[in-house]
Image (tube, grey):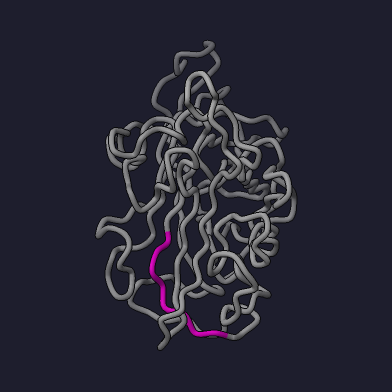
Amino acid sequence: MILRNLTLAPLALALALPLTAASCSDDGGGSSGDATTAVAVKFAGYVNGEDFACDKTFAHVGASDSTIAPLDFRFYVSDVKLVDAAGAEHAVTLDADGKWQDGEVALVDLEDKSGTCANGTTDVNTTIKGMVTAPKGTDFTGLRFTLGVPFDENHSDAATAASPLDLSGMFWSWQGGRKFLRIDSKLDGSANGYNVHIGSTGCELDATTQEVSTCSAPNRAVIDIADYDMATDTIAVDYGAIVAGLDLTADGGGAPGCMSGKDDPECGMVFDHLGIDLTTGSPKAGQTAFSAK
């Protein structure tokens, strides 16, 4: 399997998957020279390049060369854009299907609650779907997306929110909002776990409205896939790359693994691999977790 490294663009979050290039109209609601096209972005999970599955164990993970059993593998995607050969962005309007997408946010769910994956659901979702309107003949060569939930949706009540924001397993707290990415594992043959939960921190309430007004660390990564073939590529998400260089058998402090704490020793490398500045919570270049294959 050949993976192409992705770079992270600080202003947009992108994830690229095969696009279904089917023109739906001549004008797409835009100018007379525009066309609206259906988009299907596909994702696949890996651990050190090996296909992810809930009924498998994975060896040689992290600096500790650990064998792990998976527990969960889910994440939210928003602000999806296709990028043309000139570098211009074209926003993808996500379908609202009542389950995986609400029109602004999509949930990618790579676990199926089989094997050791006890946290999630039996249903899986590997494809983000939507529509893009662009001038006829536009050559799309890349895709950008945000790993996370936009602020205006992140702090809604999970008990009353519409799907896919109603999952208790992806909800941190009303003040903190959602877990943008949740990948849990345990060391094979041990009760010790290693969890990667990425979400906003430092969220404060407005004294007057008692609603969340700001988060000092948004912790939303912007993924940029610059070399992307819409017809053939899938976005690979590799847990092994996220925890590369970390000793999964040792906990230097804070929660086991990384749960987005600025003072958690494990979070520095995890955030680097995802393309997030641990100090500011802003996107930065150099992510290694997502690539096109």
Decide: is 59 above or below 44.
below
Residue at 41% across, 50% down: 108
**Residue 178: which quarter of the image?**
top left
Decide: is 22 above or below 258.
above
Decide: is 84 above or below 210.
below
Q: Nearer the viewer, residue 46 or 187?
A: 187
- The extreme left residue here reads 122
Q: Is residue 274 visible?
A: yes
Residue at 60% across, 80% down: 250
Residue at 64% across, 30% down: 89
Q: Which part of the image, by quadrant, shows the C terminus?
A: bottom right
Q: Which part of the image, by quadrant, shows the N terminus?
A: bottom right
Q: Is 72 covered by the magenta stretch?
A: yes
Q: Is residue 87 left or right of residue 147?
A: right
- The extreme bottom residue here reads 189
Give the magenta range. Answer: 66-73
**Residue 191: which quarter of the image?**
bottom left
Residue at 63% across, 48% down: 225
What percent of the width, then of the height, locates residue 80?
53, 37
What percent of the width, then of the height, locates residue 24?
39, 26
Q: Is residue 144 visible?
A: no
What percent of the width, then of the height, locates residue 222?
63, 44
**Residue 207: which quarter of the image?**
top right
Q: Nearer the viewer, residue 35 or 213?
A: 213
Q: Is 79 covered by the magenta stretch?
A: no
Instruction: Please name the predominant secondary structure of the magenta segment in the image.
Output: strand
- The extreme front residue here reads 207
Q: Is residue 209 left or right of residue 250?
A: left
What percent of the width, then of the height, locates residue 199?
54, 48
Q: Nearer the viewer, residue 85 or 57?
A: 57
